[in-house]
Amino acid sequence: MNNVTPLPSRQRAAVVQHDRAGFGELRAELHSRVADQDLVAVWAELPFPERRLVLKSAGLEADATQQISQLNKPERDAVRAAIHRMSSYANGLRDQLRNRTQHPSCELASHARQAIVEGNTKAALHWLSLIEKGVA
């Protein structure tokens, strides 16, 4: 059995060194400190009546005068979700109002009105028939 060659063996992966000098803990702490900075900025700019509305939307009974840092993590998450919902709703309303244009039949109706003012019943009926047919 001298002509048997050994199978290649996998080398063991290097052992991952444990956290050096608490760097991981420091990193986690820094992440937790900045996690709500955007929420802190939004909360600081909200007037108290709007804060109360956000808290009510979040289903919280907290005092609107307290800072966001005084709320626990689930409460902050609820506030963030409420702000997001309310912001999305407001953006949707604004887009609806911005995109609202006159119905195309309005122009035909104005032609019909003008024909009536001029006493041209035939033209007025023509414009009204176009509106009824849904041409515009």
Image (tube, helix red, strand yellow):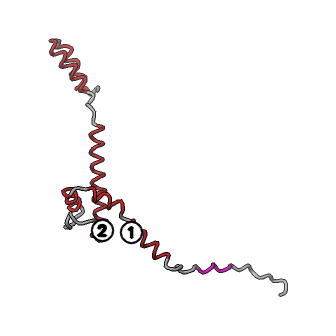
Mark 2 and mark 1 in contact? Answer it, CB < 8 Å.
no
User: Is disc 1 surrounded by few (<14), some (14 to 19) or many (20+) residues within 10 Å?
Assistant: few
Where residue 79 appears, as percent x and y from the top left, is 28, 62
Outermost residue on the top side: it is 119
Residue position for label 2: 69
* Residue appearing at x 19%, y 60% in the figure: 52
Where residue 121 appears, as percent x and y from the top left, is 16, 14
State which region is magenta.
11-15
* Residue appearing at x 20%, y 19% in the figure: 112
Between the residue at mark 2 and the residue at mark 1, the CA separation in whole angstroms equals: 10 Å
User: Is disc 2 surrounded by few (<14), some (14 to 19) or many (20+) residues within 10 Å?
Assistant: few
The kind of secondary structure the magenta stretch mainly shows is loop
Per the rendering, the mark at residue 136 is none
Rendered-image quadrant of the N terminus: bottom right
Kind of residue sitting beneath label 2: Ser
* Residue appearing at x 27%, y 28% in the figure: 104
* Residue appearing at x 16%, y 12% in the figure: 118
Q: Quadrant of residue 34 in the image? A: bottom left
Where residue 77 appears, as percent x and y from the top left, is 31, 65
- 26 and 59: which is toward the camera: 26
Per the rendering, the mark at residue 33 is 1
Kind of residue sitting beneath label 1: Arg
Q: How many marks?
A: 2
Residue 53 painted magenta: no
- 127 and 49: which is toward the camera: 49
Q: Is residue 114 left or right of residue 8?
A: left
In this picture, is 22 found above or below 134?
A: below
